Image: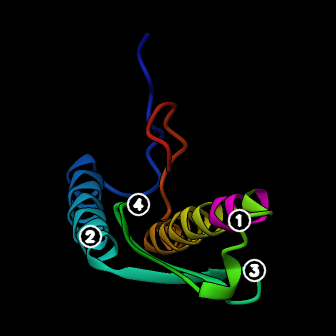
Amino acid sequence: MKVRIPNQGGSQKQMLQQFQQLQENMQKKQEELEAKEYEVTAGGGMVKMVISGKKEVKSIKIAPEAIDPEDIEMLEDMLTAAVNEAISKVESEAEHEMGALTSGMNLPNIPGLGL
């Protein structure tokens, strides 16, 4: 299947340069995002987690009062909440930052490109 890119007043060379610049900017932004670390808490601060932009858990701190041998399920729930919040935070910032790169560009809708 061929995809036709409508000519929107620019040459194909200009469009190619625009895509190349976008690709470079996106690569740089991806590297910046992966280098960042995010801290989240759950259970009113009873669980603190640090996660990288690559979604790798760097550390987990659990307040001693959060450990109740009679209620392990509560601690499990707090850990689950912290992991989910951390992943959501990383994905949300990545989506926001990558979207900002393409927002001002007049790019055609090319299926499979994901812009």
Residue found at the very far front of the displayed protein: 70
- Looking at marks 4 and 2 on the same chain, the residue that comes earlier in the sequence is marked by 2
Residue type at mark 3 is: Gly
Q: Residue at label 4? A: 55
Of residues 92 and 47, the one drawn nearer to the viewer in this rendering: 47
Q: Tell me where the magenta segment starts and ends, as one range.
A: 73-80
Q: Residue at label 3? A: 43
Whether residue 46 is in magenta: the answer is no
Q: Residue at label 2? A: 25
Percent x, y of residue 82: 63, 69
Percent x, y of residue 91: 54, 63
Residue 29: mark in rendering: none
Residue type at mark 2 is: Asn
Residue found 36% across the figure and 61% down from its top:
56
Q: Residue at label 1? A: 69
Mark 4 neighbour density, 10 Å: few (under 14) some (14–19) many (20 or more): some
- From the viewer's perspective, is 74 left or right of 28? right
Label 3 element class: loop
Q: CA distance from mark 4 to mark 1?
A: 29 Å
Closer to viewer: mark 1 or mark 3: 1
Residue type at mark 1 is: Pro
Q: CA distance from mark 3 to mark 4?
A: 21 Å
Closer to viewer: mark 4 or mark 2: 4
Residue found 30% across the figure and 69% down from its top:
34
- Looking at marks 1 and 3 on the same chain, the residue that comes earlier in the sequence is marked by 3
Q: CA distance from mark 1 to mark 2?
A: 50 Å
Label 1 element class: loop
